[in-house]
C-alpha cells in the first residue's frame, strides 16, 4: 500500500473517530448541541424533553461511525482483517460520497441547506469517502499481491 493511500485511509479513520466523539459529546452537551449540529427537530425536541430518542439515536450513529473507523483501521492493518472487508469498504465509500454529493442538488432547491455547517459536513464526508474508496482499492491490490506471492 503506498503512502498516499495510507494517508487517505488514515484521514477516513480520523474523520470517523471524530464523528464518534462529536456524537457522544452532543449527548452531554444537550439540546443546544443537537440544534447546533443540525439534528432533526424531533431529535432536538427529544433532547429538550429528556426522552430516550435523542441519546439512543445518537449512540446508534456513533456506533456506525465506530464501525467505519474499525474498517479503515483493518484496511491499514492496524486491526485484524474484518469480515467482508472489501464490500463493506465499498459500501461505506459509496454512502460517504453520496452524502457529500447529495447536498449540491438539494441546496439548489432548498436554500436552507446552504449553511456553512451543511457544506462543511459534505466536504468532510466527501474526503472520508475518498479515503474509504482508497481503502477498498488498496485492499484489492494487497489481496492480489498476496495471491501472486503464494502462487
Image (cartoon, helix red, strand yellow):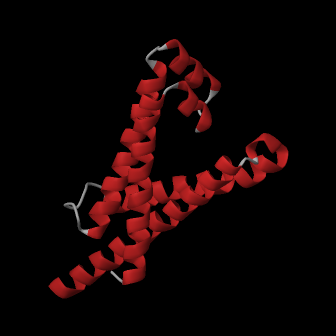
Q: In which quarter of the image is residue 144?
A: bottom left
Left or right of residue 36, residue 57 in this image: left
In-front residue for pair 84/68? 68
Left or right of residue 46, residue 69 in this image: left
Residue 39: x and y in percent read 59, 33
Screen quadrant of the N terminus: bottom left
Left or right of residue 45, residue 136 in this image: left
Q: In this view, does 26 lie above or below 44?
A: below
> Which residue sits at x=39%, y=44%?
21
Outermost left residue: 150
> Which residue sits at x=40%, y=68%?
9
Residue 96: x and y in percent read 53, 55
Residue 22: x and y in percent read 45, 43
> Which residue sits at x=46%, y=14%?
51
Q: In this view, does 35 lie above or below 77?
A: above
Left or right of residue 81, residue 112 in this image: right
* Residue 70 visible somewhere in the drawing: yes
In-front residue for pair 24/148? 24
Residue 122: x and y in percent read 62, 54
> Which residue sits at x=31%, y=66%?
75
* Residue 136 visible somewhere in the drawing: no
Q: Quadrant of residue 23?
A: top left
Q: Is residue 113 above or below residue 12?
A: above
Q: How many marks?
A: 0
Screen quadrant of the C terminus: bottom left
Amino acid at each position: 500500500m503506498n503512502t498516499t493511500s495510507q494517508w487517505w485511509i488514515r484521514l477516513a479513520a480520523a474523520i470517523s473517530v471524530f464523528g464518534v466523539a462529536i456524537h457522544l459529546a452532543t449527548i452531554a452537551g444537550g439540546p443546544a448541541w443537537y440544534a447546533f449540529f443540525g439534528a432533526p427537530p424531533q431529535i432536538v425536541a427529544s433532547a429538550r424533553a429528556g426522552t430516550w430518542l435523542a441519546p439512543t439515536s445518537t449512540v446508534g450513529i456513533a456506533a456506525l461511525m465506530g464501525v467505519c473507523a474499525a474498517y479503515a483501521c483493518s484496511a491499514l492493518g492496524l486491526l485484524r482483517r474484518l469480515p467482508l472487508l472489501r464490500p463493506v469498504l465499498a459500501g461505506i465509500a459509496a454512502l460517504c460520497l453520496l452524502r457529500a454529493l447529495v447536498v449540491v442538488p438539494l441546496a439548489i432547491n432548498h436554500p436552507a441547506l446552504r449553511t456553512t455547517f451543511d457544506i462543511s459536513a459534505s466536504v468532510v464526508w466527501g474526503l472520508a469517502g475518498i479515503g474509504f474508496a482508497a481503502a477498498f482499492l488498496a485492499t484489492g491490490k494487497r489481496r492480489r499481491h498476496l495471491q501472486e506471492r503464494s502462487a
